[in-house]
Image (cartoon, rainbow, N blue to C red):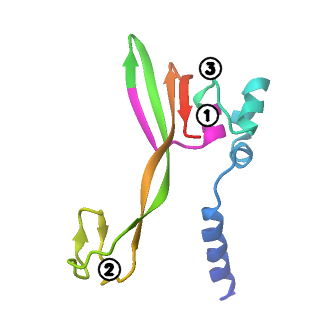
């Protein structure tokens, strides 16, 4: 019993590191998937979106957005979903910082004296979807 809890915890941590696929999202929300048209179901399985899709279809195809923005266009409600990823950024060590200091330029906490390059992860936008009255009006994605 004592070894079961740590193994279960390790399994949950590893499972949380696996990126969600469209099929995994479909499996989690089959009721949303069955409400889609046959054409939209095909696109969702491929992780693609198209004009006229619902927000549920986009969430199944691309997942939850990192940020959401509400607005209006004329008398219609608009919404923009932004998707993000992160990439490593290698920086030279800064010797003028001491352990425990916050480095506001690199926006991270300095843990000690470093001799090699430092690495931080910088977010970047990978795509956006614009909705007009809860339907996809347009979208863009980084290739």
Rate crowding at label 3 as few (under 14), some (14 to 19) or many (20 or more) other CA atoms within 10 Å.
some
Give the structural element (helix, strand or loop) at label 1. Answer: helix
Rate crowding at label 1 as few (under 14), some (14 to 19) or many (20 or more) other CA atoms within 10 Å.
many
The residues tagged by marks 3 and 1 sit, at their Cα atoms, a distance apart of 10 Å
In the picture, measured across the screen, residue 5 lies left or right of residue 45, that is left
Quadrant where the N terminus sits is bottom right
Residue for point 69% across, 49% down: 21
Magenta-colored stretch includes residue 111: no
Label 1 sits on residue? 58
The residues tagged by marks 2 and 3 sit, at their Cα atoms, a distance apart of 49 Å
Quadrant where the C terminus sits is top right
**Which is closer to the viewer, label 1 or label 2?**
2
Q: Which numbered disc, 3 or 1, marks the residue that appears first in the sequence?
A: 3
Number of numbered discs on residues: 3
**What x and y, as percent, mark residue 29?**
69, 42
Mark seen at residue 111? 2
Residue for point 51% across, 24% down: 131
Residue for point 61% across, 21% down: 51
In the displayed structure, 115 sits above or below 73; it is: below
- The answer to which quarter of the image holds residue 43 is top right
The answer to whether the residue labelled 2 contacts the one labelled 3, judged by CB atoms less than 8 Å apart, is no
| First to last magenta residue range | 56-70
In the displayed structure, 33 sits above or below 1; it is: above
Residue found farthest to the bottom: 2
Give the structural element (helix, strand or loop) at label 3. Answer: loop
Label 3 sits on residue? 52
């Amino acid at each position: 019993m004592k070894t079961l809890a740590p193994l279960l915890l390790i399994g949950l941590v590893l499972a949380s590191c696996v990126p969600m696929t469209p099929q995994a999202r479909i499996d989690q929300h089959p009721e949303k998937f069955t409400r889609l048209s046959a054409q939209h179901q095909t696109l969702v399985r491929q992780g693609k979106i198209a004009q006229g899709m619902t927000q549920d279809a986009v969430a199944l195809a691309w997942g939850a957005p990192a940020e959401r923005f509400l607005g209006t266009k004329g008398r219609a409600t608009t919404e923009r979903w932004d998707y993000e990823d992160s990439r490593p950024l290698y920086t030279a060590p800064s010797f003028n910082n001491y352990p425990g200091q916050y480095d506001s330029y690199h926006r991270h906490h300095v843990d000690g004296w470093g001799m090699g390059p430092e690495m931080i992860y910088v977010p970047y936008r990978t795509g956006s979807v614009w909705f007009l009255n809860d339907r996809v009006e347009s979208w863009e994605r980084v290739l």
